Image: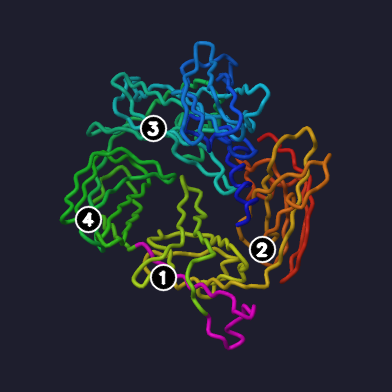
């Protein structure tokens, strides 16, 4: 990788980090000049740590300055800190304080020089959700599991991800702290007190995630969410896990959104016998997991309908999760990637120069992803322990080769999703690479007022289901001559693309064409071996 690319990647940590991605209660400021020279001039570095909501100083924040040996200081009552004898050049500063998180967008690069070296570090107070869990009669319920989920953008797609949890106290109260700004849903897992059950619900009284009330939280906000759980009679479910190794894992009773339902249970692991008491009426999914201690994982998913009566003798069948071998056909030495047609035997050289991922198309909480790994003896590329479901295949290449095609049986994985079943071996995935890759040169411009150093180039295929590409590129200042380093080259598979330039893509649902509609872009058609160029202005992000 060229030195410039490494420079770009380091800058992305600063300029593209959304608060959600920076959770860890620290602020980082990185300069963009040469590294400090310990033998050069030294200067004091001063600064202040402030609250992003109130602008008030934050005392007793731990501030660290990283050189060859880290230096640490605590902010005083006025929020200020100081480091002495810091050499000129690039420095990294970090601030952290319990109860706060980072808003990295509020910080800019910092370089120690001969002038004033005073910097402001910004921390944001976490939001809080509090409430009480009560039954139908208004009595508090103790030990109810509370789960908080946040709507996030993962690889350009919306997804609910668990962000925290708690349990209700003796008086039914609960509290979840240090939440970042965003949209949330809350799930109370219910409780059982034979023969009755307090039925699990999403806030305020919803049976599933889709009908839950979303809560929008701002930094430092406190939101009260009280639950009144419906009380009804519970029923008994008995069953047996069959078809796998001796039961050695765990199990759960879930609703259609993946929320765990509280029940009373008794498990005979040696015989796989299971008894659940206090199961509410409704349709549930009993999920079991096990393994054979040899790296093979098994899963059972059995739908159970409880219609105001006990359910006996349920068979819960284990299926081994699927191992999918992958054949990688690299381009021929003479540049002809269609080796089969030319009579040349394909050479499977393994994973170098390629990353591949299976991405679940499910809208459930925290979608599954599987990365291509070397498995077995001798090591061969494969996706290991893939759960049943529908998946998109994402392939990224590095170096001179690019993707030509990907197949599983008769399924074109650049056009259609991969179906992984629970009771049949999956055919191998064949990934064919080519050497006559087109090259795209991109230049991004920004006005003189915009001090950002890098942009995120978003490259969206015009057809098929291939994943959009994101890449950091340096920004060209409009008031200066364009040096060669402000252009960035990349290899792509032949095809048609829409190209965008954003300050960052954090929180942007860029895999949704409707979200991208209205943003400026350039269309480009890339043929084999072609060299093309695009020049874009940095787009201004719209508020969500």
Q: Are marks 3 and 1 in contact (CB under 8 Å)?
A: no
Identify the element where label 4 is drawn: loop
Going from N to C along the chain, the mark reached first, 4 or 3, is: 3
Marks 3 and 1 sit apart, C-alpha to C-alpha, by 40 Å
Per the image, the residue denoted by label 4 is 247
Residue 190 horizontal/vertical position (percent): 34, 33
Identify the element where label 1 is drawn: strand
Return the residue nearer the eye: 290 or 202.
290
- Residue numbers of the magenta segment: 321-346
Per the image, the residue denoted by label 3 is 165
Marks 4 and 1 sit apart, C-alpha to C-alpha, by 29 Å
Judged by depth in the image, the label closer to the viewer, 3 or 2, is 2
Per the image, the residue denoted by label 1 is 380
| Identity of the residue drawn at 65% across and 35% down | 544
Residue 302 horizontal/vertical position (percent): 34, 55
Question: Counting other residues with Cα less than 10 Å from the Cα at mark 1, is it few (<14), some (14-19), or many (20 or more)?
Answer: some
Marks 1 and 2 sit apart, C-alpha to C-alpha, by 26 Å
Per the image, the residue denoted by label 2 is 492
Q: Looking at the image, is 481 positioned above or below residue 175?
A: below
Identify the element where label 3 is drawn: strand
| Identity of the residue drawn at 54% across and 27% down | 217
Horizontally, is 541 left or right of 355 in the view?
A: right
């Amino acid at each position: 990788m060229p030195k410039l690319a490494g420079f770009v990647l380091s800058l992305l940590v600063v300029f593209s980090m959304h608060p959600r991605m920076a959770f860890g209660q620290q602020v980082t400021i990185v300069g963009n000049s040469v590294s400090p020279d310990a033998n050069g001039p030294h200067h004091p570095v001063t600064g202040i740590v402030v609250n992003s909501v109130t602008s008030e100083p934050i005392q007793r924040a731990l501030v660290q300055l990283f050189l060859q040996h880290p230096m640490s200081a605590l902010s005083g009552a006025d929020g200020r800190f100081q480091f002495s004898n810091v050499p000129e050049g690039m420095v990294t500063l970090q601030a952290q304080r319990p109860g706060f998180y980072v808003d990295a967008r509020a910080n800019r690069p910092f370089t120690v020089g001969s002038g004033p070296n005073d910097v402001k570090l910004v921390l944001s107070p976490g939001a809080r959700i509090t409430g009480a869990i009560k039954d139908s009669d208004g009595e508090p319920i103790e030990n109810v599991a509370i789960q908080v989920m946040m709507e996030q953008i993962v690889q350009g797609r919306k997804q609910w991800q668990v962000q925290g949890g708690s349990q209700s106290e003796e008086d039914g109260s609960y509290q979840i702290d240090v939440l970042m700004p965003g949209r949330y849903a809350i799930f109370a897992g219910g409780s059982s007190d034979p023969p009755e059950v307090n039925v699990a619900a999403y806030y305020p009284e919803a049976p599933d995630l889709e009908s839950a009330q979303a809560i929008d939280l701002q930094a430092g906000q406190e939101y009260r969410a009280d639950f009144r759980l419906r009380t009804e009679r519970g029923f008994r479910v008995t069953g047996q896990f069959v078809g796998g190794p001796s039961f050695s894992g765990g199990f759960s009773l879930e609703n259609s959104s993946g929320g765990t339902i509280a029940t009373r249970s008794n498990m005979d692991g040696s015989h796989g016998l299971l008894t659940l008491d206090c199961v509410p009426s409704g349709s549930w999914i009993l999920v079991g997991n096990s393994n054979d201690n040899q790296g093979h994982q098994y899963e059972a998913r059995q739908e159970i309908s409880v219609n105001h009566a006990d359910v006996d003798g349920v068979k819960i069948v284990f299926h081994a999760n699927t191992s999918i071998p992958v054949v990688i056909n690299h381009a021929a030495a003479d540049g002809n990637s269609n080796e089969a047609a030319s009579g040349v035997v394909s050479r499977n050289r393994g994973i170098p120069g390629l990353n591949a991922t299976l991405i679940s198309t499910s809208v459930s909480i925290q979608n599954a992803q599987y990365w291509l790994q070397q498995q077995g003896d001798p090591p061969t590329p494969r996706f290991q322990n893939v759960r049943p479901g529908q998946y998109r295949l994402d392939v990224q290449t590095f170096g001179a080769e690019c993707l030509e095609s990907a197949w599983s049986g008769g399924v074109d994985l650049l056009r259609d999703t991969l179906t992984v079943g629970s009771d049949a071996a999956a055919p191998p995935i064949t990934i064919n690479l080519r050497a006559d890759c087109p090259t795209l040169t991109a230049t991004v411009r920004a006005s003189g007022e915009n001090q950002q150093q890098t942009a995120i180039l978003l490259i969206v295929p015009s057809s098929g289901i291939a994943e959009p590409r994101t890449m950091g590129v340096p920004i060209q200042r409009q008031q200066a001559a364009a040096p060669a380093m402000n252009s960035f080259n990349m290899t792509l598979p032949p095809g048609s693309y829409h190209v965008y330039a954003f300050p960052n893509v954090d929180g942007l649902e860029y895999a949704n064409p409707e979200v991208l509609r209205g943003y400026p872009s350039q269309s480009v058609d890339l043929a084999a071996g072609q060299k093309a160029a695009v020049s874009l202005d940095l787009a201004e992000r719209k508020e969500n």
